[in-house]
């Protein structure tokens, strides 16, 4: 039987995973089997820069953390090697980076994911991965708002230019 110290450490780890899952707006579970250290280091760097928390986690720890929550459906995919990627504020970063990585490495597979404490299908994860980044989406919205104003300004300028030409013609 494990010592009391080990049990307390494991309980603390389960509590930390449960809190991490509860605070995350989105997350992805992957099977990282078969990748080398250099690729894993590059992947972790890209995830870290995007604000995604990525850790290799024991399946039993995740199972205990999701027990009795809305994310209990994630338990079906917990077999083999498992890594958990969560994001607190960006809904698409983890899915985008990990799906892109999985498309380049045949052994690396996306198992499951969640969005706002709801388990989502692999199809939804793929569609999330295809969305542009938050900055690109905000720039698109800004350009949509700016387009009518810019068109109005060009129209006013055309009227001013046209009236200026008729005034010059009348003066000559």
Image (spheres, grey):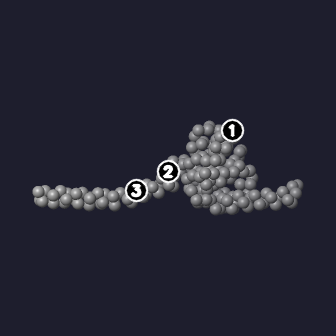
Residue count near mark 3 (Cα–Cα under 10 Å), binned few <14, some 14–19, many ≥20: few
From the image, tell me which residue sits under label 2: 132
What is the x, y in percent for residue 98? 60, 46
Tell me where residue 64 appears, x and y as whole percent: 73, 57
Mark 3 vs mark 2: in front: 3
Disc 3 element: helix
Label 2 CA crowd tier, 10 Å (few <14, some 14–19, many 20+): few
Earlier in the chain: of badge 3 and badge 1, it is: 1
The residue at 50%/55% (across/down) is 135
Q: Is residue 111 left or right of residue 160?
A: right
> Which residue is at 63% across, 51% downward?
48
SS at mark 1 in the image: loop
Indicate whether 80 appears above or below 168: above
Residue 146 placed where, x, y %? 38, 59
Camera-side residue: 139 or 77?
A: 139
Residue marked by disc 1: 36
Circle number at residue 58: none
Report whether residue 62 is seen.
yes
Task: Give the total number of marks visible in the rendering.
Answer: 3
For the residue carrying disc 1, how many other residues have a C-alpha within 10 Å: few (<14), some (14-19), or many (20+)?
A: few
Which residue is painted at 84% across and 57% down in the image? 6
Q: Is residue 53 left or right of residue 7?
A: left
Query: Real-space Cα distance between discs 3 and 1?
Result: 42 Å
Which is nearer the eye, 148 or 120?
148
Q: Is residue 78 visible?
A: no
């Amino acid at each position: 039987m494990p010592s009391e110290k080990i049990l307390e450490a494991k309980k603390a780890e389960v509590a930390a995973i449960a809190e991490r899952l509860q605070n995350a707006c989105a997350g992805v579970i992957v099977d990282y089997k078969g990748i080398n250290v250099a690729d894993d280091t590059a992947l972790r760097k890209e995830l870290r820069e995007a604000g995604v928390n990525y850790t290799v986690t024991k399946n039993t720890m995740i199972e205990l953390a999701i027990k009795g929550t809305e994310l209990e459906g994630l338990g079906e995919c917990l077999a083999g090697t498992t890594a958990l990627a969560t994001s607190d504020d960006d809904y698409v970063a983890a899915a985008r980076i990990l799906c892109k990585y999985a498309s380049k490495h045949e052994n690396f597979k996306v198992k499951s994911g969640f969005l706002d404490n709801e388990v989502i299908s692999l199809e939804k994860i793929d569609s999330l991965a295809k969305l542009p980044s938050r900055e690109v989406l905000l720039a698109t919205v800004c350009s949509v708002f700016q387009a009518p104003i810019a068109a109005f300004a060009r129209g006013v300028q055309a009227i001013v230019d046209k009236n200026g030409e008729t005034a010059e013609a009348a003066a000559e």
